[in-house]
Amino acid sequence: MSFRKTDDVSISLTSIFMKLVGLWIAANKSEQRVRNITVGYTMIAIIFGTWIQITDMCYSWGDFSTCIYITCNLLSLSMAFLKILVLLAHKEDFFRLILYLQERFLYADYNDYEKRIIIGCKRKCIFFVSFLTFSIMATLGAYVLKPIIANISRNTSDRILPFNMWVDLPLTVTPYYEITFVLQVLSLYHIGITYFCFDNFLCILNLHVAAQFRILQYRISNITDLMNRETLEINQRFSASSSCFANKYYETFKKCIRQHQALIAYCKKLEEVFNLIVLVQILVFSMMICLHGYQILIAKTSNIVRTIFICHISGCLCQLLMFTYSCDCIIRESLNIAIAVYRGPWPFLPSTTSGKMMRKDLTIVIMRSSVPCYLTGRGFFIVSLETYTSVLSTAASYFTLLKQRVEATS
């Protein structure tokens, strides 16, 4: 099962990456076998990369800068491993989120104003996804260029690999070097894709949910636009049969309520699937930004290593921003439902049975909208733009402590 043809570059690009990882909806059994093989390869690549880094850490213990460098790599590996494990555990629910996005959000019947909301949402998705993808791909490219540049002035017997491997083999000699180099690069790119593709998709889901809340606000505020002209004329004349208008209004409003309930349920399912990833990611971001800052500003490393971490810290900041901003959009737009209710023509409804029920339901909607939809870090905190500033503040504190420690030992 794949998305129909769409002009949404962000979804098309992200779906390609997720197919490469192996977590995407299969159309038939043969395609499902390919997905299973791809997931297996992804797990092997992550385990292979983790083994390389842990072994290098053991042999490099005592070299502070090298250990910091390896720790940065291990944090990225652990995040990629956690994301795929969590989503494999919630695979059915994750696929339902994808199908619901496709059927109810992307290809629903919208009027011109609602289409403009969806187009604005797509533009935001394209910006965030493109920038994060470029940053991570640039980081991966810098990892590959590092040994290529370093080997220019070296003998063939003294060549280095993208990552140190401590095995009892002549890895600097042909063909061992070329085989090992290709294996490391393939694993590197697969791990990199696993690291960011799920964050891209979560951002897309969040922004589309926020857009649906905006569309719901418009429909509630302009509920008469959803009704036929005959009913509208009855409302304008305020004739003795105006109860017909109240009945029609109430029926249309119930559709909006059902849409609101569906969006709330969708947000709860998002929270259920992604809350553990959110928790660990927010906790790890502070440490990663701190350690990347150390590699850029303090550590005595080559320019290519600094380039790696400049690209990586740019990706981290974008990743954190799109993550917290998209969650904040859900909070703000779900709260604005209560404001949209006041803009409707409910004061003109007659005191009929439908009119009284309508006012009661309006009150319930306002009360429910006062509690926003949100994503949390396993229930410990709500993710919003305030989380972004908190993570940066914590990272700055960690960096200050690390700098003082380095200055004290030097």
Image (cartoon, grey):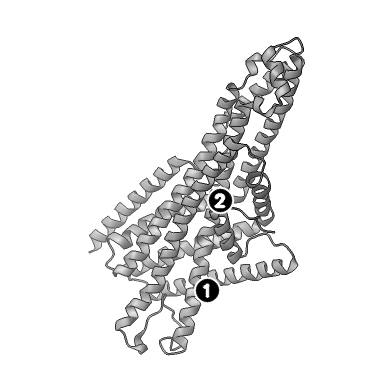
Q: Residue at x 41, y 64 (%)?
A: 138
Please tell me which of labels 2 and 1 falls first in the chain. Answer: 1
Identify residue type, mark 2: Leu
Image check: 259 left or right of 185? Answer: right
The answer to which quarter of the image holds residue 243 is top right
Q: Which residue is mark 2?
A: 202
Res 48 label: 1
Q: Is residue 337 above or below residue 169?
A: above
Is residue 210 something that shows in the picture? no
Q: Position of residue 249 (x, y in %)?
A: 71, 23
Local secondary structure at mark 2:
helix
Q: Nearer the viewer, residue 196 or 85?
A: 196
Q: Nearer the viewer, residue 374 or 279?
A: 374
- Report, in whole angstroms, how far the alpha carbon at label 2 lies from the one at label 1: 27 Å
Q: Residue at x 65, y 71 (%)?
A: 37
Q: Position of residue 155 (x, y in %)?
A: 32, 88
Name the mark nearer the viewer: 2 or 1. Answer: 2
The mark tally for this picture is 2
Q: Are marks 2 and 1 in contact (CB under 8 Å)?
A: no
Q: Nearer the viewer, residue 127 or 139?
A: 127
Q: Position of residue 370 (x, y in %)?
A: 57, 28
Identify residue type, mark 1: Phe
Q: Is residue 284 above or below residue 52?
A: above
Q: Position of residue 46 (x, y in %)?
A: 53, 69
Q: Residue at x 59, y 42 (%)?
A: 209
